[in-house]
Amino acid sequence: MADTHVVEAEHAHSPHLRHHFDDMHQQFDSATFGMWVFLLTEIMFFGGMFGAYTVYRSMYPDAFAATSNFMNPAYGAMNTAVLIVSSLTMALAVRAAHLGQQKILQIMLILTMIFGLGFLVIKGFEYHEHWVDMKVPLFAGHWAWDGPNAPPQFAHQAQILFCFYFFMTGFHALHMVVGLGIMTTIFVMARKGTFGPEYYTPVEVSGLYWHFVDIVWIFLFPLLYLIGHTRNLI
Amino acid sequence: MHSVTPVRTYVLIWLILTIMTGVTFWVSTINLGPWNIVVALGIAAFKMSLVIWFFMHVRTDNPLTKLFVFAGFFWIAILLAMTLGDYFSRTWMPGGKFW
Amino acid sequence: MSTALQEPEVKETPNYLNAEYGWKSWLFTKDHKRIAVLYLISISIMFALGGVFAMLIRLEMLTPAGDLFNSDTYNKIFTMHGVVMVFFFLIPSIPATLGNFILPMAIGAKDLAFPRINLLSWYIYVVGALFALAAIVMGGVDTGWTFYTPFSTTYSNTFVITAAVGVFISGFSSITTGLNFIVTVHKMRAPGMTWGRLPLFVWANYATSLIQVLGTPVVAITLALVGLERGFHIGIFDPAIGGDPILFQHMFWFYSHPAVYIMILPGMGVISELVTCFSRKGVFGYSFIAGSSLGIAIIGFLVWGHHMFVTGMSMYAGLYFSLLTMLVAVPSAIKVFNWTATMFRGSISYETPMLYAFGFIGLFTIGGLTGLFLGTLGLDVHLTDTYFVVAHFHYVMVGGMVVAYLGGLHFWWPKITGKMYPEGWGKFSALLVFAGFNLTFFPQFITGYLGQPRRYHAYAPEFQVLNVMSTAGASVLGLGFVIPLVYLLWSLKYGKPAGNNPWGAKGLEWETTSPPPTFNFEETPVVTEEVYAYAKHGEVEVG
Amino acid sequence: MPELPLWPEAASKVATDVDHLYIYISLVSVVMTVLIFATIFIFAVKYRRRSESEVPQPIHGSLRLEITWSIIPFLVMLTFFWWGAKIYFYNAVPPPNSMDVYVVGKQWMWKLQYPGGQREINELHVPIGQPVKLTLASEDVIHSFFIPALRIKHDVVPGHYDTMWFTADKPGRYHLFCAEYCGTEHSGMVGWVTVMSPADYQNWLAGGGSSGSMAQQGERLFEQLGCSGCHLLDRQGRGPMLRGMYGSHVQLAGGGTALVDDAYIRESILNPNAKITAGYKPNVMPSFQGQLSEEQILQLVVYVKSLGNANAPGAPAAASTAAAPAQGGKQ
């Protein structure tokens, strides 16, 4: 439990060092740790949703499986792949910032944003399909539960699942939008040559956020799209 | 600050993640009964671990970060376990005297 | 007090208060001390508002008939009393004011790790509070602070969404404060300030922050679901189409039970400081008090089901929630015993903060023990949703938390303002609070066991005598809260200069000037002695 | 002089048990509180500061003490837990010879129905010495059925049936409260429980004007709503034959079985497609959601129950025409 901070009066202060930190190391550590604590709250935030979802799923497993047939796993899988690539480019962006490779950093940030945007576009197409399909229970005129794949006994439960679907993917998409905003800021900062081996904290920290949003999707994909896939033919 | 991870590692992790996505998709088309969800969540957990461990640098991070990451999932487990404990045992009616 | 004389009074030393002037210097400050003062002002306003609602409740309860207000108004009054007090006073109270002010200094840091996020936290709080106030002004909410479904989602005709949005938003101010504290305690400690030397107030706030960070997001998502359900009627909590109202209660109490530890833990931290300082003696069982804070934070997450014993929850779930409730009482008991033992062979003086500490230990003991009544399955069936519950949580929240808050405020007032409060008035109002409090809430244990349900606008006539006692006590208690408000404000101008360390207390915050300079210390302090090393300090003074 | 009761009446064995438990925990608490108060007081006086310069010797702690004052209180608390759990479990399981009463909570009144067809609002009449099982349903929000003199309450959650039971053993008139906040007139949702001798109770039953037993009222509904067109009494029709069905396990169309109990019957009326019996088609029976009050649903449940219990000897009983005896839905 010995104290880890070493106070050295650094004569050459980095311009990025805020006054209340002793050194850049402490600042970097605090920022990344702070982001992790924030992600802890995010875990609980999505965890609450997953918890409520799990309870209903355990109450109505068949209804949820049937409802899942109205999700298009191709969209889900495609978006998973897109997000994973964006995570790769993000990781490479952080690496480039750390090594001071300005050009690569900017390219990787652009790629990350493109993939992030791609995710939202695909999601938009998917939402549109649900809208046309009358699978948006939030709006009375856009909800219908009929057809051969819609067993009537599940009418009510299906509504609940679709609510969770929009609630969870909606909050996830909101996080993506926020992430894109952050990436834009980081990109502008990168253009000004702010980052280098001694200061890349913002890139690292926003990278953590980006990867977390990716992880949420990694769970949403099987839970929402794949639970009833095999029951298609019943 | 962190040591630099080689590009090769990142690409390799990405490859595994993409392949696992395909595997999840494929497994879901086979009827394993209740095991479908277990396999799907297992793969998701594995993918998550890779992202956390490599992309998010927890591999080289200090034990404190590891503890906090663990705490997050542990707390979700509390929420789920104790809530579902109620739902699953609600219908068990005791048949007679218990004490 | 002797140290006060050492301070030459000719010229004001530069401090956080006179560093800058003008409203902008306050509204855009990044100084944790100024933010603490902003918080202090805003939660005092909310406390006064909640207090007015409390008095209105007690006035209505003077007679069994519901004759002062109509029932809708009464329902709105107790709901807004609960919402304002719980979410806008109790939860931020000690962490956001005393914690914000003292914690960085107590660990020898220049500021919190994220000063801008700290300021943001206050703005979030204000926006949340404005939503709550808007709900009140527009016509109020009548769901009870617990927002139980399906009443809140379908049947209430009041401004539920506005209030829920207010609570949702203010939750993020709680999260950001907690996040800031956790990072600060981990990363910003002065050299030599090891975990084993952290003041117990810091330990308590650290444990509180863990709860804030882990629990608050869940209530946020729950209230979001309530808003969604109320706005669109999609059935998530609507039993008519397969939704489950009990799920709401699980998710709500997953946060809201630990939230009572958010409210009480910092108070326990304050008391640990007060008892050692006014016994002038190192604390007894330091590691047990520190560890019990963490223990409460963790076990506190495992007991929420004891709010739901009569809801039709599985009786097996009832078993484990009840058993764990017994377990969570152990760390609280450890604290009480250790405070008592700290006084053994101490050198005890009776300044106002110590009087509050005595009051806290007594009232919290009663509040904690009556919690065991409610955690006991068969007994809870009778007691839950009666005035017994009301009495129990007011013993913990007011008798515990508010008393600790006042004790801490008096204790650190000289540090915050550089001025002493009038000691005689302080003692007088402390006694008023203690007497008024007991008169208000003790009779409610009896009406509760008699069966008077809570949230009743009109009640059975045989409960009247006890209710009149309660209302009489409430007016004494109210006076006990108004007097400090007056003399503390008075002391800002007329109070005697306090000096750096009027109590002869240990702790880094007492080593800097009062009021402290903007960055707390002229030089980063280096800690070389153990925590609460009163004996050594004393030798220096004598020698 | 206004009355000042300090202890509630106890009108059942459970109430007395709860009182004993309450007294036990109170005594422990008082002893603890007095101990702590006295210790603090003694210390505060004995060790008061006598001079500004005195500095006491530090005492850092004692592991032995810490363990003692953690373990002993916990063991004492375990006795609370054990005793409380015992009462809780006792309260949870109604004895088989219980008499049924059906309760519907509705903003802001209690509606009660007896198997014999008597109906009351905000009043419950029960004989002493007879276990009474209440089946609780809510029309709207969560209510809570609370009888302080019996030391029991149970939330009434909409969407499904809750049950509670008691055996009152002292005649008298006791408060009935709604204990879960339910809206504007929450505090008006109160009533009385009258506990009477069996003879008085029989008189009271006979005195109430009744339009037939609950089962008969249910049967009338069964015909009015056209249920009897498909659910035939002597053979399988477009819907399953209900005679002798109560208490049995039926095969479901989607696989699995379901126990035919009150909750299943209620669900089948409101959401017929939820659990279709094997061999029958979905979408044949219309939903009665929103068309029936909880009271009427309970009447139908009691009627189906009266058609015979699969587990009872001699089932199916020909109860549809004979008025059900006042005391029992089950025979």
Image (tube, rainbow, N blue to C red):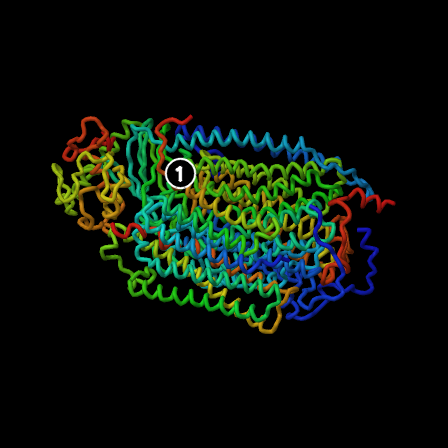
Question: Residue D268 location in percent, x, y?
Answer: 24, 44
Residue D240 image-quadrant placement: top left
The N terminus of chain B lies in quadrant: bottom right
Farthest bottom residue in view:
A192
Q: Is residue C293 left or right of residue D225?
A: right
Q: Is residue C499 above or below residue B79?
A: below
Question: Residue C476 location in percent, x, y?
Answer: 60, 48
Nearer-the-camera pick, C371 or A47: A47
Q: Amino acid at mark 1?
A: Ser
Labels in figure, total: 1
Nearer-the-camera pick, A183 or C141: A183
The 10 Å Cα crowd at callout 1, few under 14, some 14 to 19, many 20 or more, is many
Q: Which residue is at a point 42% across and 33% down the rendered structure image?
A: D88
Farthest right residue in view:
C543
Residue D18 image-quadrant placement: top left
Q: Is residue D313 above or below residue C475?
A: above
Q: Is residue D81 above or below residue C231?
A: above
The C terminus of chain B lies in quadrant: top left
Q: Is residue C208 above or below residue C366?
A: below
Query: What chain is tagged by disc 1?
Result: C
- Residue C421 visible in rendering: no
Q: Which residue is at a point 65% across and 52% down the rendered structure image?
A: C185
Q: Is residue C468 left or right of residue D307?
A: right
Q: Secondary structure at mark 1?
A: loop
Question: Residue C460 location in percent, x, y?
Answer: 42, 42
Q: Which residue is mark 1?
A: C314
Farthest front residue in view:
B8
Nearer-the-camera pick, A181 or C446: A181
Q: Is residue C287 left or right of residue A154?
A: right
Question: Residue D330 location in percent, x, y?
Answer: 24, 31
Q: Which residue is at a point 62% across and 57% down the rendered structure image?
A: B3
- Residue A149 visible in rendering: yes
